[in-house]
Amino acid sequence: MKYSFGRGYIGDNWQVYFNEPGSSTDRSDYVDGIDAPLASAIDAAERSLDIAAFELNSELIYEAILAAHRRGVTARIVTDDRHGLEDDSHTALRDLRAAGVPIVADNRSGLMHNKFVIVDERAVWTGSWNYTRNGTFRNNNNVLVLENAAAAAAYKTEFDEMFERGEFGARSANDGVISMGEGAGEISIIFAPEADEIAALEASIQAAQSSIRFMSFVFSLDELAGAMTEKMTDPDFVLRGVFEERNSMASWSQLPSLYCAGAQVRQDGNRYILHHKVIIIDDDTVITGSFNFSNSAAQNNDENIVIIRDQVIASLYLEEWRRVWDSAREVPPGEVNCD
C-alpha cells in the first residue's frame, strides 16, 4: 500500500508501516499518511480501544477515537502528563476527555513514552510513531501491527496496570519477557523499565552471527554498545548504524565509541528527526518499539519493546534501513577523536 507520506505491507496476522517524510513545511500538504490505516482500524473497532499515547494531535486519529466513543466503543487512554494532557500546543486529548473519554496521565517526572493501540483485544499497533502531525509527516517512524490475541492480551495487561492501578515506571508489575510462537515466527514482548530489558537486548545482540544494522533516535546505553563492539573481533561481521544527527556527537552518545571500534556509522539526513528505535539482526530478527536505547528508557520511562523473528518482516525493515542509510551523512574524517 502506498500513501503520499508512507507505505504499508500486510502479511499473515501482521502489518508494517513506514512513513516517508517530505520537504514541505505547509501543513495543508499533510494528508494521506500512515495515520490513515490506524484511523481505519479505529473506525472498524466494535467493542474496545485501549490507547497509550505519549502525544496525540493527529486530527484524523482524534476524530476516529471520538467517533468510536460516540458509537458506543469503550475507549480508554493513558498518556504522559507534560507531553499529553498538559501540552498547551494541542488540545486533542483534553477535548476527548471533555467528550467523555476517560484519560489517565502518569503525573510523574518519568515519561509515559508508549505508543500503542489495542483494538478489540485482538490486534495491537506499536512502534516508534507518536500520533502527531510531526510524527506522521516529518519524522522517520515505523509501525508494527500484531493481529495476535496473545500479544494483544500482553499489552492489555500493561495498559491495565497504568490505567486501572496507576502503576508507572519501575513500580509496574514485572511480567518478564513474554514470548509466543516459535522458530521463524517467535515474538518476544518486553515492558520497561520493570523488566530486565537490557539483558534481553544484549542476548539478542550477542546471538548475532553475521550482521547488526540499526537506526536510532537516541543511543547512549554502554551495555548495548559494548555487546555490539565485541562482534567487531570478527572481521567479516557487519555492524552499521544511523544516528539521529542531533546530539549524535554528545558526550553520552555511542556514535564515537562505535566509530572508533570500527563500526560503520552515519548521521541521518532527514531535516527533521530520525525517530526509529530499530535493530535488525542477521536479516531475520527485528527489535522495535518505543524504547530509545538510553538510560532514561531503561530506568524511568514506560516503554515497550518487540523482538520478532520473521524474515519477511525483517526484509521490510532492512529496506527502510537502507533508505535511511543511503540518505545519511558519513562522519567526516577527523570529527571523532579516537586517541
Image: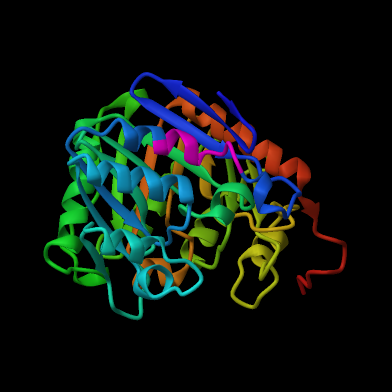
Q: Quadrant of residue 259?
A: bottom right
In screen coordinates, is 252 left or right of 81? right
- Judge whether residue 14 is colored magenta: no
The residue sitting at 54% across, 60% down in the picture is 225
Residue 174, percent from left and from top:
18, 60
In screen coordinates, is 260 left or right of 137? right
Residue extending furthest toward the bottom: 109
* Residue nearer the viewer, 15 or 38: 38
Quick check: 105 above or below 128? Answer: below
The residue sitting at 15% across, 56% down in the picture is 160
Residue extending furthest toward the top: 12
Residue 101, percent from left and from top:
23, 57
Q: The N terminus lies in which quarter of the figure? A: top right
- Please report the bounds of the magenta region as a residue range: 31-39
Q: The C terminus lies in which quarter of the figure? A: bottom right
In screen coordinates, is 101 left or right of 245? left
